[in-house]
Amino acid sequence: MTPELTELLRSVRPADEAAMQAARERQAQLTKPPGALGDLEALSVRLAGVFGTDRPDPQGVAVIVAAGDHGIAAEGVSAFPPEVTGAMVANFLADTPAGPGGAAVNALARSVGAQVYVMDAGVAAGLPEHPRLVRAAVRPGTRNLRREAAMTRAEAEALILAGAALARQAIEDGADLLIPGEMGIGNTTPAAALTARLLRLDAAEVTGRGTGVDGAALAHKVAVIREALERSDVTDPLDVLAEFGGFEIAAMLGVMLQAAASRRAVILDGFVEGSAALVGVALVPALADYLFPAGECAERGHAAQLAHLGLHPMFRLGLRLGEGTGGVLAAPLLRGAAATLREMRTFAEAGVPTA
């Protein structure tokens, strides 16, 4: 492990317990019946632990969309061809009448005032130069994980550090809530392989439709993942990432680690993001303190990820697009949770009798 990555992992500390206790005590005094704000109350306490104050005030929201291609796509595990990855990167960057970017994540980000960052983490297509595109690729796509390791350890670590660097930039630009997002045709296959190995589950328990495969195509996808898992028995988290992961998954892990090291909140979107979180929490358990899952997505295996991480989704909308879209939708919920803790008056402050 590189010294830089070692230091990044060491920088992730548990949430501030004193701030969380103060937040719980404040919650008990706010002008409402206990528990009346439901899950927002628990979210506000967790945010207090992240930001180290019983009156957290998260402001900027950043979505970091890492894009990468996958050698496993050659095995027919996706309903779409690999060329879609590069085309979607162009869509993320396109100038439209509504503003920068024509994809779902761009539209949703504009609706909540979030900043979108786009990273080439390893796209196979030739991408034109663009001022809003961050170049971090070490190779144009991973190798075929059914046949060989998707990445070397060095390549995986390089993309983790690239994701961390872009997260630092977003934080310098004002982000308090960071949303790792992804684009990569075939990437639910490495995500399922990572999940199966790290949770010690059979591939069929965590492999879903991805872009829409079903029936025989889904059975084939499960078989491909089983063959990959049989090929290597690695269990070290970084080795698992290198064997079965993807460049964009490694980059998203870097975003999460840097956000936690900088005491910022991470909003998890869906299944592919969840696979990166599993690797991260296996490396440094305190990372889980900084993870806020947006919703339980429609992809099979996401519920198992969240259960293992001990996290509860904020909503269930049947999303399975990726890009960080669900995470963007969750940002106002977290801001609202923080606002209630920060801005509501206590019974004593409001002069409201409690009995």
Image (cartoon, grey):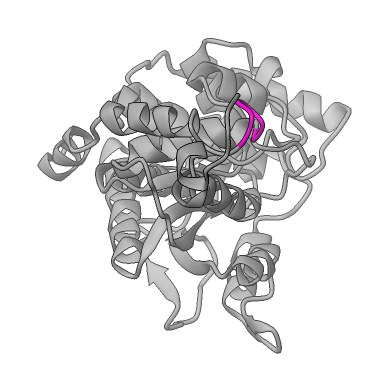
Q: Residue at x 48, y 61 (%)?
A: 61
Q: Residue at x 65, y 49 (%)?
A: 326
Instruction: State the image coordinates of residue 279 (x, y, percent, origin top left).
Output: 40, 29
Q: Residue at x 53, y 40 (%)?
A: 273
Foreground pick, 34 / 173? 34
The picture places residue 210, in percent across and down from the top left corner, at 73, 39
Q: Quadrant of residue 213?
A: top right
Quarter holding the N terminus is: top left
| Residue 141 in the figure: left or right of residue 318 | left
**Residue that extends furthest to the right in the rendered view of this protein:** 215
Q: Number of marks in the image? A: 0
**Left or right position of 164 against 233:** left
Residue 163 in view (yes/no) = yes
Whether 141 is among the magenta residues is no
Report the magenta residues as a range: 32-37
33 drawn magenta: yes
Q: Nearer the viewer, residue 175 or 268?
A: 175
For residue 170, above or below residue 91: above
Q: Considering depth in this image, is 63 or 174 the residue closer to the camera?
A: 174
Vertical placement of residue 252 versus 279, above or below: below
Q: Position of residue 146 (x, y in %)?
A: 55, 29
Q: Report if residue 148 is visible in the image.
A: no
Residue at the limit of the structure toward the bottom, as seen here: 97
Q: Quarter of the image for the C terminus: give it.
A: top right
Q: Where does the image place residue 90, in percent across and percent down from the top left?
A: 60, 74
Dominant SS of magenta comes to loop
Q: Nearer the viewer, residue 115 or 59?
A: 59
